[in-house]
Image (cartoon, rainbow, N blue to C red):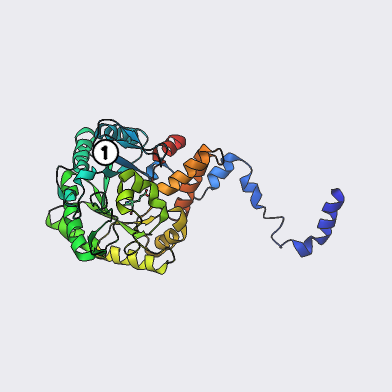
Amino acid sequence: MAERINQTDQADQRIFPASFPGTRLRRIRQHAWLRSIVAETVLSPTDLIWPLFVHDHHANAPIAAMPGVERLSIEGVLRAVEEAQQLSIPAVALFPVVEASLKSDDAQHALEPQNLVCRTIRAIRESCGNSVGIICDVALDPYTSHGHDGLLDNGQILNDETVAVLARQAVILATAGCDVVAPSDMMDGRVAAIRRALDTALQQNVCILSYAAKYASSLYGPFRMALGSATSLGTADKKTYQMDSANSDEAIREVSLDLAEGADMVMVKPAIVSLDILYRIKQMFGVPTMAYQVSGEYSMIQAAAANGWIDGPKASLESLLVMKRAGADAILTYFAPEIARLLK
Ligand code: PBG
């Protein structure tokens, strides 16, 4: 051993750069306290947004494809919101599971001020005031019998007709008391139409979080099962409106259009397979940028952890930390309560 070191010593002029041994990066990795003071990225519970599924039943019900996540009753949502407050999670995102009998081709139930998501928003406001942010999807997929995010005509998703409905949906959500509307449909021009409709309805303070770079991904599968839109959708896909995973420049164009149309914040999803996009967007625009760790990302970690193949909490922490490193200001994740508890 000593001999080998000596040989290395003699050779060091050739094999080591001039900075060595003066610079040894391992020195700053020796202790946990040292690693923590040199950490460039910190994950905090205040970075997390907790997506919640709400259904119109009195009991919570498990979602088979998302172990640990449930469809909640409105009561269940109120308990979760209280938990979010205790854990310093600043906001929840609501996703209604709509009864099949209320779905239709034209998604009219989305415009019903007494629908489930509006009732849930009002219940949160009544019991928790303004202390937790409420974010709601603007899209028609929970309400369409065909499972698409837009209106369908002869197999085509109609853009402008859909946008007109989305603008009305946004106003109804805002009127119920939602703080942030999040168009997740990827129709062209919807951010401008929603902004105009909100302002006309005197809802200037309601924010728009645009799902700006949303890819047509296989990783939304468990979410669609949770909503029941998977069966409605059948073998159809959303590739004529959601983005092609092959593209990066196009994500930049999407974000710049949405910002010009009045988006306050933008989102990238799925997160872990779009870290390059997240990084580019944050670098280029410097605006509040969210990442959505989608259902499939969650379930992959949960499935591997359940098999004992990976350490679930460590893997989820790592996945969220690297999203922040890439540029995310906040992250929507189904792991929000577990991670917030870990971080506390
Ligand atoms: C609906 C919507 C989807 C997600 C968020 N909003 C599914 C889709 O576009 O098909 C996915 C979230 C997840 O998978 O966790 N437009």
Direction from residue 115 to residue 81 in the image, left or right:
right
Task: Identify which residue is drawn at 20% across, 65% down.
Answer: 160
User: Image check: 248 left or right of 26?
Assistant: left
Depth check: 295 or 174 in front? 295
The residue lying at 46 percent from left, 35 percent from top is 342
Q: Is residue 38 visible?
A: yes
The percent position of residue 168, horizontal first and vertical second, equals 16, 55
Location of residue 196 with respect to 341 vertically, above or below:
below
The residue closer to the viewer here, 222 or 344, is: 222
Image spot of residue 107 (x, y percent): 19, 52
Q: Residues within 10 Å of mark 1 (few under 14, many from 20)?
A: many
Report the amino acid beneath label 1. His
Identified at 38% across, 51% down, the residue is: 220
- Closer-to-camera residue (232/317): 232
Give above or below for 328 relative to 188.
above
User: Which residue of the protein is positioned furthest toward the right in this rendering?
Assistant: 3
Q: Total label count?
A: 1
Relative to residue 224, is residue 109 drawn left or right? left
- Is disc 1's CB within 8 Å of ligand 1? no
Q: Position of residue 233 (x, y in %)?
A: 31, 53
- Is disc 1 placed on a helix, strand or loop? strand
Return the residue at label 1. 55
State which quarter of the image contains the C terminus.
top left
The image position of residue 86, as x and y in percent, is 35, 32
Q: Residue at x 42, y 66 (%)?
A: 248
**Would residue 329 be seen by someone viewing this image from the given angle?**
no
Examine the image and state in which quarter residue 288 appears.
Answer: bottom left
Q: Is residue 165 above or below residue 296?
A: below
Say which quarter of the image contains residue 197. bottom left
